Amino acid sequence: MNYGNIKSYDIADGTGVRVSLFVSGCRHHCKGCFNAPTWDFNYGEPYTRETQDKILELLAPSYIEGFSLLGGEPFEPENQPVLAELLEEIKSTYPEKSIWCYSGYLFDKDLAPGGKVYTPYTDRMLSCIDILVDGEFIQELKDISLQFRGSSNQRILHLKDGKLVKEGL
């Protein structure tokens, strides 16, 4: 897996100050995407054990509220094995910190058993995610007044142990 960027102090992609990882690879190709270079699975740098160690180190300060996972597309099947391991390590090391994930795939359709991108790693990832923002960005539904979303079709889903608890902020 490759990644496009790691933000050490991100305040746009979830609540509080966060560490964010932008993975490479996305098949959605949403019109108006804010991060189109990450569509290419080969974009950026190779993700290594050193990358994971750096993320864990960046999460250590108490003022860091959590971790945000974006892309590209974290739930592309090629990305899931590496990200399942990363998310499990973050949850184990920092259980008090929240994990947000942004995906163009739909929780109750594409990420469900039998869904378009469901793999043996999908449930492992979902069980670590506290907030999932799902749905493709749709240029025609763009709304800059929305918090943590780009278009009105996208949902903010609160998860617990991979199950939907509530929708919305």
Image: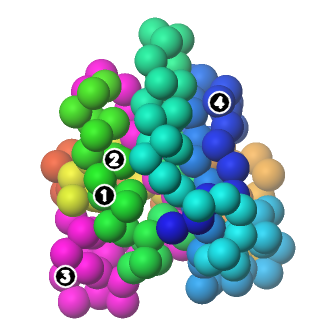
Observer-side mark, 1 or 3, equals: 1
Q: Which residue is at the front of the view, 63 or 21?
A: 21
Question: Which of the two labelled residues, at mark 4 and mark 1, occupies the earlier sequence position?
Answer: 4
Range of the magenta residues? 95-123
Where 135 falls versus 7 (above or below)?
below
Q: Residue at x 77, y 58 (%)?
A: 143
- Local SS, label 1: helix
Give the residue at x 52% y 33%: 54
Left or right: 131 as drawn, with respect to 58: left
The answer to whether residue 156 is visible is no
- The numbered mark, 3 or 4, whose residue comes first in the sequence reads 4
- The residue that appears at 22% across and 52% down in the rendered structure is 127
Residue 32 rendering spot, x and y as whole percentages:
82, 73
- Which element type, helix, strand or loop, lies under badge 2? helix
Q: Amino acid at mark 4?
A: Ser
Q: Which is in the foreground here, disc 3 or disc 4? A: 4
Circles 1 and 2: CB atoms closer than 8 Å: yes
Q: Is residue 126 left or right of residue 60?
A: left
Identify the residue position indicated by label 2 in the image: 87
Q: Quick check: 42 left or right of 111?
A: right
Q: Amino acid at mark 3?
A: Pro
Q: Which mark is residue 113?
A: 3
The reply to whether callout 3 and callout 4 are in contact (CB within 8 Å) is no
How far separated are the C-alphas under marks 1 and 2?
5 Å
Q: Quadrant of residue 17?
A: top right
Residue type of the residue flagged with mark 2: Leu
Task: Determine which residue is flagged by label 1.
Answer: 84
